[in-house]
Image (tube, coloured by chain):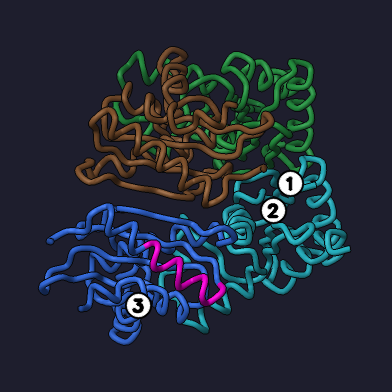
Chain colours: A cyan, B green, C brown, D blue
């Protein structure tokens, strides 16, 4: 497999939602392909309207710069990469986005938004877990 | 009910996908709420990458101007509403988007893109059918 | 091969430039990947400044909707797809852009702008010719 | 010479790529003219997709404000030039972009992105070296 199918994207969303329910939070969940284009999206009931764009932004960011979005944000701040987050029609530099790789190849990303950044990251971690096997 | 739940959005997407498979086409399916914000999205395997934005655009357009997106396009062209489609960060004025009402109240919209406009519209019609009851 | 390498992109640009010189015109030449992201670009001396964005737009359009950009434009006009060209941060619907496939898989696109649309298309045709073998 | 020819732009890209290979990094390389419009671009195999826009952004920034992009970023931060990086459709304020002058006249800029800002700057320095003679 060198790309995420619709079935895999649906599975990623199911896993993310399962974890969000465990944590008792309502989030938006986005899955992008390796070219940063949206594959699947779900807004859980009760999630903030504003989280829609942030979740998609986190997934897009990880497909464009394939590191966890929190690490990318740290890099922007620590290295004072002024204007970096304005590039590519807007990037998101805090936790909750994760790139997904198979055989060292980026195949897409997941982005979570709606809870704390730490919880968003925990949900993203859980969602992509099986891809790390 | 005065809004579309995540469960209803998922059902709309399932129905749209079912109809698309019947027609033998691969499409993008978007569901927005009454405020034109994304609720759920699915890109079927094989759908054009460019259809992502168009499907979301059709749903957004119908939540902003609650008529079928094809009728809205005819209005723009016939009434020479110059610049109308440039408003609201871009509107889509051709068939495949439908507003969803309950008790005469707009509760959201569905947008389909990837096949011909006629097929997109047929899929949207099928998806929202039970809401017309 | 399932993607265009930098070497292949450079070769596409060389071929396009060769044809442009044959025709006695100065153009901009863009090559995008399958996800519509820029791989390589060249502005020939004397090409219009405004053609930069158009050439990139033609290539992007063909990676998003994998048909020749002229055919896509005809579709937009004939089917009255109002607002279609406003989607995806702007599409270009006239001749000069061509998708590139290998084994029925889109691997990228080339976009030419600066001469007449017919000449732009002729240059694009020549550039991608060997991919049709 | 009061402008960068296509041949010179190609030479700048070759020099940048040569230095990048020396450093063992994969980057995007952009060359803009004195009016901040793209002249030439190359994405090396393996460079991040997101670096495309950043490399072009660094070159654009240096053609608009002809100082090294890292110095421009320091100025923005130190002088608290709120909103400066939001102007001009987005500027990039960290190292890797350099203006190119001849006879005290701005003739264009080079922008590098994909490695660390320090490496990007080293590559840009090497690329424009002969212009400093």
Residue D23, position as x, y percentages in the image? 52, 77
Residue A133, position as x, y percentages in the image? 89, 63
Quarter-wise, where is residue D33 in the image?
bottom left
Q: Is residue C131 left or right of residue C72?
A: right
* Numbered badge on residue A108: 2
Residue A14, position as x, y percentages in the image? 83, 50
Q: Which residues are magenta?
A: D13-24
* Numbered badge on residue A3: 1
Quarter-wise, where is residue B12 in the image?
top right
* Numbered badge on residue D125: 3
**Pointer 2 and pointer 1: residues touching (CB < 8 Å)?**
yes
- Secondary structure beneath dot 2 equals strand
In percent of the image, x 26 and y 74: which residue is there? D130
Q: Is residue D42 above or below residue D75?
A: above
Task: Kindly report the distance in space between the C-alpha atoms of the residues bearing marks 2 and 1.
Answer: 7 Å
**Which residue occupies the foreground of this view, C52 or D4?**
D4
Circle 2 or circle 1, nearest the eye: 1
Q: Is residue B86 above or below residue A48?
A: above
Query: Do we see residue A51 in this rendering?
Result: no
User: Dot 1, crowdedness within 10 Å: few (<14), some or many (≥20)?
Assistant: some
Tell me the quarter of the image containing the N terminus of chain D: bottom left
Task: Kindly report the distance in space between the C-alpha atoms of the residues bearing marks 2 and 3.
Answer: 34 Å
Task: Kindly report the distance in space between the C-alpha atoms of the residues bearing marks 3 and 1.
Answer: 38 Å
* Numbered badge on residue B59: none
Task: Please name the predominant secondary structure of the magenta segment in the image.
Answer: helix
Tell me the quarter of the image containing the C terminus of chain D: bottom left
In percent of the image, x 75 and y 18: which residue is there? B24
Residue D36, position as x, y percentages in the image? 25, 58
- Secondary structure beneath dot 3 equals helix
Q: Is residue A30 left or right of residue C68?
A: right
């Amino acid at each position: 497999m060198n790309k995420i199918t619709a079935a895999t994207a649906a599975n990623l969303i199911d896993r993310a939602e399962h974890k969000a329910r465990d944590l008792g939070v309502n989030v938006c969940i986005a899955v992008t392909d390796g070219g940063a284009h949206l594959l699947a999206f779900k807004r859980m009931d009760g999630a903030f309207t504003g989280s829609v764009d942030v979740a998609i932004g986190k997934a897009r960011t990880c497909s464009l710069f394939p590191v966890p979005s929190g690490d990318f944000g740290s890099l922007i701040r620590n290295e004072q990469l002024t204007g970096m987050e304005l590039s590519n029609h807007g990037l998101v530099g805090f936790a909750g986005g994760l790139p997904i790789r198979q055989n060292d190849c980026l195949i897409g990303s997941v982005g979570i938004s709606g809870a704390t950044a730490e919880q968003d990251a925990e949900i993203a971690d859980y969602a992509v877990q099986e891809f790390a096997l």
